[in-house]
Amino acid sequence: MVGDTIKRYGCDVSIKTGDKVVNTSAFVEPLRYKNKIYVGGEYHYVGFRRTEKYLYIGSPEYDLTENVSVIQMFDNKYIVKRCELYYVNNSPVYVWAILLPYGSASEDDYESD
């Protein structure tokens, strides 16, 4: 049922991992401040670091690899920073991932002083 909902209401995305590209449907939405526990929980002042992150919900049949898989939706590209499968009764139901804009410096890329 979850897979049908993703296929029916999700946006068209492509997943590129290495040389392999697959087209599927998924949800990609901005992570709000209330979700910051998943991505370090630190507040940064606007303009100092690029901290925007996105949540991906997609079909479990397509593997995602952290720091390798690139998700493209419309003209936007994102790199997978963290991903996990969600299971019900030992069966994978969906995969969720934390995404960062592809090619941008992220919090982890800055040196601490």
Image (cartoon, rainbow, N blue to C red):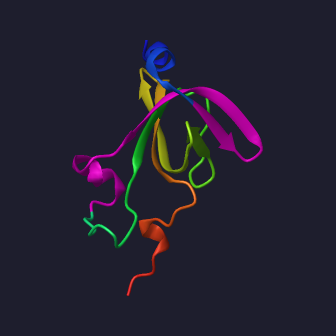
Q: Is residue 97 above or below residue 109?
A: above
Residue segment shown in magenta: 13-41
Give the image location of residue 96, x and y in percent. Answer: 45, 37
Residue at 48% across, 13% down? 4
Q: Quadrant of residue 73?
A: top right
Q: Is residue 13 above or below residue 108?
A: above
Tell me the quarter of the image containing the N terminus: top left
Q: Nearer the viewer, residue 105 or 60?
A: 105
Give the image location of residue 82, x and y in percent. Answer: 48, 50
Relative side of 83 to 14, left or right = left
Give the image location of residue 95, x and y in percent. Answer: 48, 33
Relative side of 113 to 45, left or right = right
Tell me the quarter of the image containing the C terminus: bottom left
Relative side of 102 to 6, left or right = right
Q: Nearer the viewer, residue 64 or 44?
A: 44
Residue at 26% across, 69% down? 45
Q: Quadrant of residue 23?
A: top right
* Residue 90, magenta (yes or no): no
Hey, which residue is sitting farthest left in the picture?
Answer: 34
Residue at 47% across, 20% down? 6
Hey, which residue is sitting farthest right in the picture?
Answer: 19
